[in-house]
Amino acid sequence: MWDMPSTLRSVLALAPLAVLLVAGCAAPADDAAEEESAPTTTDGALTQSGVTLLWEGNWDFLVKCDSYSKSQKAVMFTCDEHPSRSYVDDEKWVAAPRNAFSRSMCNKTARVCKGSRCVEAEVIERSVTSNKWEASSAVMEALGVDAGFTSCTHSWGSVTGVTVTVR
């Protein structure tokens, strides 16, 4: 039978301690106020707080950079496959996270709040992310967030600590 060298035995003996030390050095968690809550349902309303809201884009960005819209040369949403350019660019709409979205949410009203700033938007899309909401330029503007893009690989506009209620 092979006898494990003493150096290897020593390293293996210390491995669990190394795991504990590395785990203890992890970055601290965000404040509880910024921590995303699991969706809750009360009186038929779905509420999620502490969420991150990302800018989904305007017509130009989506047609140029979104794979679904790019292939059609027009914006396509899950709940409305043919929205007008003015709707995409000027109206208040949101995309629900993939893990929370269902077709029954289509065209429902979402109340989106960051602090005392609130806006109502139509649920029109399923987000490409599993746990983040996405929003139109009009929603981001109403919440005081600058959003835009210079290329498909350089876009901006996000806000954390948002509460979303869908009725």
Image (tube, rainbow, N blue to C red):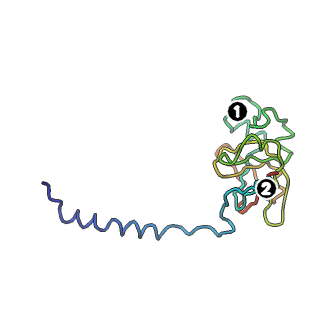
Residue 47: x %, y % from top left: 75, 57
Residue 30: x %, y % from top left: 62, 67
Name the secondary structure under disc 1: helix
Residue 125: x %, y % from top left: 75, 42
Q: Does residue 148 lie above or below 80 as drawn?
A: below
Q: Choose between 114 and 57: the one closer to the eye.
A: 114
Q: Choose between 154 and 145: the one closer to the eye.
A: 145
> Please, what is the three-letter code of the amino acid marked with disc 2?
Thr
Q: Viewed as shown, does residue 117 lie left or right of 8?
A: right
Tell which tag, 2 or 1, sits nearer the viewer.
2
> Please, what is the three-letter code of the amino acid marked with disc 1?
Lys
Q: Choose between 151 and 75: the one closer to the eye.
A: 75
Res 29 → quadrant: bottom right
Q: Which residue is mark 2?
A: 165
Residue 70 is tagged as: 1
Residue appearing at x 43%, y 67% in the figure: 22
Instruction: Tell which residue pokes out farthest to the left in this image.
Output: 1
> Label 1 neighbourhood size at 10 Å, few (<14), some (14-19), many (20+)?
some
Name the secondary structure under disc 2: strand
Q: Choose between 66 and 7: the one closer to the eye.
A: 7
Instruction: Quarter of the image for the N terminus: give it.
Output: bottom left
